[in-house]
Image (spheres, helix red, strand yellow):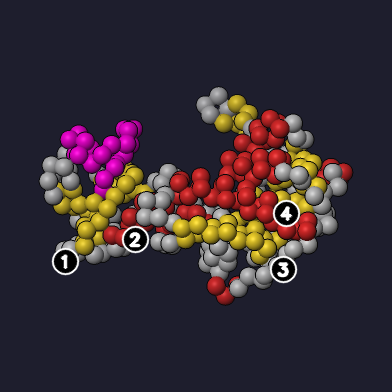
Amino acid sequence: MKIVFMGTPEFAVPALDVLHASHHCVRAVVTSPDKPQGRGRKMAVSEVKQKALDLGLPVLQPKQLKDPLFLEQLKEYHPNILVVIAFRVLPPEVYTIPSYGAINAHASLLPKYRGAAPIHWAVYHGEKETGITIFQINKTVDTGQIIYQTRIPITAKDTTGTLYNTLKNHAANALLQAVDMLEKGNVQPIPQNHAAATPAPKITADTGALDFTQTGEQLCNAVRAFTPWPGAFFYLNGKRIKIIKASYLKTDIQQPGTITLISKQQFAIHCADGYFLPAVIQSPGRKKMNVTDWLNGTDISSCKHVDL
């Protein structure tokens, strides 16, 4: 199969590697334009572009996917299929060019968690499994027919960061499997059950705000979901305090948001069903540290409640 690969972040790099190493032919790579980054505002290339350059592949970086020049360039590669992972929404002008259309790798078990942040929300909602879905791209985002799915468990220790690293490799193998199946004509697309769809909206810097009217389990899920970014947090004396790891203890005491200093080594924040117990904490401008070290350098004896 002649492939044009489309992707931008590091999540897509293993897939490009795997497809390039296969018997299929990656004719070109489409990725986002270079962007200025850092204090010096130097132009930085995407992880996918860097990998494409390392592999000696042609790179296209259109600002607009409907740009006639880009569409003509795309047609010149005569792709049989577009393989998409962690890229932009494709217009029909693009995905109708190849005879096999376009397939996308989505990091959830569609139709669950359609949207920009499927890994975060699967962890947040306490799911016990997730996976990769390869589906055919159509006019509506994340709604196309499913051609391949692979499942993996979510453990109690998983964070969005650990799942991200696991799923990017599963996505690479799933895409290769899907392209092989399409080439052999061994595909029976399955329509999604739209009634079972759940959203996975974009994450912002403020999404990680902890709500202590939730249960301890829900709060710990939130900590795992928003690690490493944007970080789960609460405000104490006007300062944003990040929680990196935590546990909980069910008790009869339920005064959400109230702070109790249990010992010199541990404090608790009351939640809907007991104590939320921070284990690794980060204050503004300081390194991550365990709760004991944090308490040694932070006087919370006068703090009765988190900031509302």
Residue drawn at (86%, 47%), measured in percent from left and top?
78
What amino acid is labelled 3 in the image? Gln
Q: Residues within 10 Å of mark 3 (few under 14, many from 20)?
A: few
* Quadrant hosting residue 96: bottom right
- Decide which of tag 2 and tag 4 comes sooner along the chain: 4
State whether residue 212 is above or below residue 192: above
What amino acid is labelled 2 in the image? Gln
| Residue 272 is at least partly visible in this image | yes
The residue wearing badge 3 is: 188
Question: What is the CA distance from the residue labelled 2 to the residue labelled 4?
Answer: 39 Å
In the image, 29 versus 20, the foreground residue is 20
Confirm or deny contact between disc 1 and disc 3 (CB under 8 A).
no
What amino acid is labelled 4 in the image? Val
Q: Give the residues drawn in magenta, as a range.
A: 278-297
The residue wearing badge 1 is: 252
25 drawn magenta: no
SS state under label 4: helix
Q: Position of residue 120 (x, y in %)?
A: 47, 54
The residue wearing badge 4 is: 179
In this image, 212 relative to 103: left or right? left
